[in-house]
Amino acid sequence: MHDDPQKREITNRRHFSFRLNLFFFVVFGLFSVLIIQLAILQFVEGPKLSAQGSQKSTRSVKIAPIRGNIYDSSGTPIAYSTSTQSLYFTISPDFKDGDAETIAAKLAAVFKDKGSDDPEKQMTVEDIIRQMDLDFRRNTISTPRRIKTDLTKKEIAYFMEHRSEFKGIDIVEESVRNYSKDTVAVQLVGYLKKFKGGVREALDFYKDKGNEEDPQLQYLDDEDVGYDGLEFMYQDILRGKNGLKTYPVNNAERIIGPVQITNPQKGDDLYLTLNRNVQLTTEQAIVDQIHKISTSTIKSERAENAKIGFAVAMEVNTGKVVAMASMPDYDPNIWFGGKISNEDYKNFESVLNNGTIREVFPHYETKEERNQHPSSLVPPGSTMKPLSILIGLKEKLFTTSSTYYDNGAYFFGSKGHEVEIGNASKHAYGLLDPASAIAHSSNPFMAKMVGNNLYEKYGKKGVDVWDNYMRQFGLGVLTGSGLRGESKGTIDYYHEQQTASSQSALVRASFGQQARYTPLQLVQYAAMLANHGKRMKPQFVDQIKDAEGNVVQTFKPEVLNTVDFSEAYWEEIEKGMSQVKVQGFEGVTYTFERKTGTAQSDVAGRRVDNAVFIAYAPRENPKLAVAVVIPDGEFGGWGAAPIARKIFDSYDYEVGLDGPAGKLSDP
């Protein structure tokens, strides 16, 4: 049966029409999807893609921030940044091998003609090429190289006028760190070093800085950063924020548009608790006293090996440190540019560290010779005796009216192996109560009434009891200063317990042996005696201000811990401290409490006497506590005490001990 041709044609037309309609429908659908995608791309993804595209075609160069300043309590600058203009060179992608000599020669000619007349500031072609760092030892290819700093006005004007002649050259404003020529508390203030070149790897604080994503907070390899002291402790506050120099480039890395500059933000300024004049008086007093005792013709006052000295003055109820001296010191401007020469480092290595918080030694040519002398960490000696009496009274080992007959020696230990504890110069002081035991500095009283009685009460646990009291008074623990590298001191009474006996450890510790503490720990302890049991956190910064002078942060006194003793116990030690004989305080116009110490230590086979002294003034409502340590300084009463007198006098004049500042009454 044959199909009807007419019907077949009609059917074919219908199928064609259906296929055509289906084709147009599919095409319409595809175009609709394409239009929608284009709309999404333009209106939704467009801004994001545009930003990404812009980012890929721009380059940013970070400009180092201007570091904040450090002032003393009166607003006098101690460490400050000055602005300078520096010339930088950036290697372009089309830079050729022979270009360096050509550019360097042109720069050297300009420097010679327009630069400083100082021969030390003249740069040769070789100097300039070295600064270009063509072998990438210090920088990547895109990092601008600093060729010269401290440009003269003539140099700046010439380069600005002939910019097109010097490809890759930029003039950048940056800061240079300066320190007071008076060398005010230089070890406390600290110094700067280059971020790249050891600092980043040496200190954990800086290791995390490499992960910073904010370009304004990212550290520059050539940036000077705090390495020690307050410069390190307040690094984040002092640093400020980077500036940014952003410019568009094409695929060949050529600049194709205007440069946009975000200026760097200056760091905040520190206003210290240090009083400049008190600090300088303290430093000079140490230097003068060391010279006096090391050259004295009086045999009983001569300390020929005295080379170094340390002192800290801290307000009793605020914890504000008004003076902190580690002598001898040095001029920190030797760190100019974040580097120090090998010769300077060799000459000043022994004084770079702060001896009031760490162990430092006198300067000697050889290490063997240096180790024959004591360091800044010495035993407290008899300055421990007020605390020994407090412990004895608190533990009910005796009362304020108890007596002990000091015949010049006390013996302890097993029969036939007794150990003698005697007084200096074998003095015998007779009948003593706790106060007079402090006044006469009786070793036998402390050994028997405190050390031995504590051993009889607790046995070997007595050493733990003693250690607990030491820690409460800030001895053997950190002071809370926050300074990098602060020492906890050295505890020896546990070693004595293991190698000798618990009795020996307690007996010897009771009169100031078996431990070594820092001067900052000693002044914190002295302040606790003065304020009757509040351990104050040492404060170095009074307030922080921004670049416009607005106060952004202040600091309040902080009590780290307190101890609870009967008022009668405090009065007993004060009675004894007021009777301690001391040189250098003749004719004072204020009252004061004090305790001398002659701390003995064995160094290289010889017995060394170290001068130690603590005091506070005035007696009623104490305001200032002082601790002085002169290693190898012999007796504290004349080796260290006169320094404290000058500190108190200076503070009284500048601030006022028990009234207005003395300088206010000057004609």
Image (spheres, helix red, strand yellow):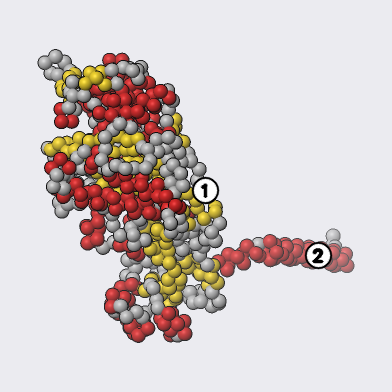
Identified at 18% across, 30% down, the residue is 424
User: Which residue position is annotated with label 2?
Assistant: 21
Frontmost residue, 325 versus 417: 325
Q: CA distance from mark 2 to mark 1?
A: 81 Å
Identified at 45% across, 55% down, the residue is 74
Identified at 34% across, 23% down, the residue is 391
Frontmost residue, 469 versus 109: 469
The three-letter code of the residue at mark 2 reads Asn
Quadrant assignment for the C terminus: bottom left
Q: Callout 1: helix, strand or loop?
A: strand
Quadrant assignment for the N terminus: bottom right
The answer, for residue 218, to whether it is visible in the render is no
Q: Earlier in the sequence, mark 2 or mark 1?
A: 2
Residue 436 to residue 610: above or below: above
582 left or right of 656 in image: left
Can you give x and y, in whole percent of width and height, for residue 505 in the image?
A: 24, 25
201 left or right of 7 in image: left
Is mark 2 in CB contact (under 8 Å) with mark 1?
A: no
User: Which residue position is annotated with label 1?
Assistant: 554
Frontmost residue, 125 versus 576: 576
**Mark 1 crowd level (few <14, some 14–19, many ≥20, 10 Å Cα):** few
